């Protein structure tokens, strides 16, 4: 057994420990039981080492896997302990108002009538989410003082807002308190100085987009470039959701992974060599993530997508899967709450695995289609990448959102291949518009043609029958789907591999 395969099993055990304790709270006595069982398994394997090499290897592997299972359980329990003993949690839902001072630690989330501020409270490790009036505006690193009532994040019937915030280290809210600006002079370290300049650049480009593109094209282009659909009109959002294209205007896990994979065939189509296209695609995606302000969800998806792409370049399919699992376990070691509470993490992991395992079968199926594939190969790649990712992410999307779009695959195929080019052209138009409104408008014309085409596709596919709601999707159905999918992939891999090899 190779070292990478052994590490793969250890990572699976670690992830299983986090998942197990997230679903069922494991008492401490069971942790000691797992540890003792692991030690016993290792000792037994040594006693039988002279009789059976299989028993020795299996016993040792089982013992160390139990250790990593306990490590996963202990890691999530340590995180839960930190949450329970947070300095602000004990004050949540208290009837008295309290006054807190702190620093805004991320870009303010500005909406039409209000803004949300993440505030690192002085003297603690606690982060408070403050909902304030739209004006006056505040900036990253501003020091403010807030006076109001702390409360626990609510849990709605169709959305657990508490878990959504908890994964980002936010356990307390304060809605529309009295807010006072203490200091707008910022003290920097290397990262905060760099991050502030990135946010200023993003803000400047956003203003340029709205000067050079008319609504609703401006909202769509802002979504393509910055993954921001928060200010998009409600009717336009409904069209995106019904056609299964909402991921194009939001920084989702699967969106980053698909973007990475589609960039390579697109760059090859434009004339780059494969090696050049690979590294240029990686660079472009990380420049994109940097440009949109390094949101946590995009960084996670970028790490996962980059790991998958690198694994495919330097390893076989099986070793590539191991690389993805190892990357996921390292991210969970840093934040175990991602596993069950971060949909973006789940989608990026599943999309990577789908592209890795399902795309080869999609390519094999399309190989029977007689078309000039050399000239439009990137369209075939875009289609197979999109379908492969959706096959693996479908149950999670249904479980969390309870809706499915029937025409999503076709709609994605018609527009997704053009997204990288449209994003680049839109970015160049916005950048030029910072210096010259006329130059920005001229460069925006090619983008406006694409956006008109995009809006035509939205209107064409926005039909009452295009989407179906499915309520109360059981997690048992999700597990059964993935078990069936795993068996199917293994079967296809076994029986079609000779055909892939030309046998």
Image (cartoon, rainbow, N blue to C red):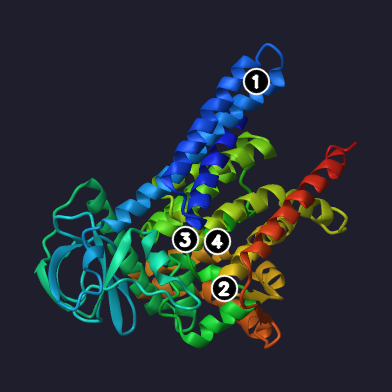
Q: Position of residue 488 (x, y in %)?
A: 79, 52
From the image, tell me which residue sits under label 3. 341
Task: Measure the C-alpha gap from mark 2 to mark 1.
Answer: 47 Å
Q: Earlier in the sequence, mark 2 or mark 4?
A: 4
For marks 4 and 1, the one nearer the N-term is 1
Which marked residue is nearer to the observer: mark 4 or mark 1? Answer: 1
Q: Is residue 280 visible?
A: no
Q: Is residue 397 left or right of residue 89?
A: right
- Depth-wise, is mark 3 or mark 1 nearer the camera? 1
> Where is residue 41 drawn, in percent x and y?
58, 27
Q: Quadrant of residue 436?
A: bottom left
Disc 1 is placed on an element classified as: helix
Residue visible at 52% across and 81% down? 237
**Residue 238 shows up from this direction:** yes
- Which residue is tagged 2? 401
Instruction: Report how far apart the C-alphas of labels 3 and 2 lie in the structure.
Output: 14 Å
Q: Which residue is under mark 1?
A: 56
Q: Residue at x 71, y 60 (%)?
A: 481
Few, some or many C-alpha atoms within 10 Å of disc 4 (few <14, some 14-19, many ≥20)? many
Extreme residue in the right direction: 503
Direction from residue 152 to residue 408 in the image, left or right: right
> Height in image: 462 above or below 101?
below
Give the residue number, with chain letter if any, for mark 4: 255
Q: Earlier in the sequence, mark 2 or mark 1?
A: 1
* Pointer 2 with pointer 4, Cβ within 8 A: no
Figure check: 104 above or below 97:
above
The residues tagged by marks 4 and 1 sit, at their Cα atoms, a distance apart of: 45 Å
Q: Nearer the viewer, residue 324 or 268?
A: 324
> 222 or 465: which is nearer to us?
465
């Amino acid at each position: 057994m190779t070292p990478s395969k052994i590490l793969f099993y250890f990572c699976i055990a670690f992830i299983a420990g986090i998942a197990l304790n997230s679903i069922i709270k494991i008492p401490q006595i069971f942790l000691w039981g797992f540890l003792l069982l692991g030690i016993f398994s290792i000792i037994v394997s040594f006693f039988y080492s002279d009789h059976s090499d299989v028993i020795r290897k299996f016993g040792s592997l089982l013992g160390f896997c139990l250790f990593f299972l306990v490590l996963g359980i202990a890691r999530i329990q340590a995180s839960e302990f930190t949450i329970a003993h947070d300095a602000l949690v004990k004050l949540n839902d208290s009837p008295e108002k309290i006054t807190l001072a702190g620093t805004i630690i991320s870009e303010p989330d500005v909406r039409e009538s209000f803004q949300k501020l993440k505030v690192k409270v002085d003297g603690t490790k606690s982060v408070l989410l403050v909902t304030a009036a739209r004006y006056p505006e505040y900036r990253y690193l501003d020091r403010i003082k807030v006076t109001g009532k702390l409360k626990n994040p609510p849990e709605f019937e169709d959305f657990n807002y508490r878990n959504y915030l908890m994964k980002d280290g936010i356990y307390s809210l304060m809605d529309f308190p009295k807010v006072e600006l203490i200091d707008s002079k910022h003290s920097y370290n290397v990262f905060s100085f760099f991050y502030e300049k990135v946010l200023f650049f993003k803000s400047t480009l956003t203003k340029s987009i709205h000067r050079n593109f008319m609504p609703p094209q401006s909202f769509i282009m802002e979504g393509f470039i910055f993954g921001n659909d928060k200010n998009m009109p409600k009717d336009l959002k409904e069209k995106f959701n019904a056609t299964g294209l909402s991921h194009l205007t939001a920084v989702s896990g699967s969106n980053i992974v698909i973007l990475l994979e589609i960039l390579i065939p697109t760059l090859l189509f434009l004339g780059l060599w494969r090696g050049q296209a690979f590294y240029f695609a990686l660079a472009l995606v990380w420049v994109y993530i940097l440009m949109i302000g390094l949101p946590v969800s995009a960084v996670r998806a970028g790490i996962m997508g980059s790991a998958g792409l690198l694994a495919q370049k330097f390893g076989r399919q099986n070793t590539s899967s191991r690389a993805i699992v190892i990357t996921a376990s390292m991210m969970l070691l840093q934040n175990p709450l991602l596993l069950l509470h971060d949909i973006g993490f789940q989608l990026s992991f599943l999309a990577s695995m789908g592209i890795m395992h399902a795309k080869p079968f999609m390519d094999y199926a399309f190989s029977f289609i007689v078309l000039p594939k050399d000239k439009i190969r990137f369209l075939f790649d875009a289609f197979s990448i999109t379908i492969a990712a959706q096959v693996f992410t479908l149950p999670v999307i249904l479980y969390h959102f309870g809706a499915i779009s029937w025409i999503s695959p076709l709609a994605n195929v018609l527009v997704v291949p053009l997204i990288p080019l449209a994003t680049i052209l839109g970015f160049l138009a916005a950048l030029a518009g910072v210096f010259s409104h006329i130059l920005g408008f001229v460069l925006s014309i090619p983008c406006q043609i694409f956006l008109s085409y995009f809006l035509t596709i939205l209107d064409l596919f926005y039909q009452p029958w295009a989407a179906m709601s499915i309520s109360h999707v059981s997690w048992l159905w999700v597990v059964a789907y993935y078990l069936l999918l795993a068996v199917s992939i293994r079967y296809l891999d076994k029986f079609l591999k000779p055909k892939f090899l030309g046998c």
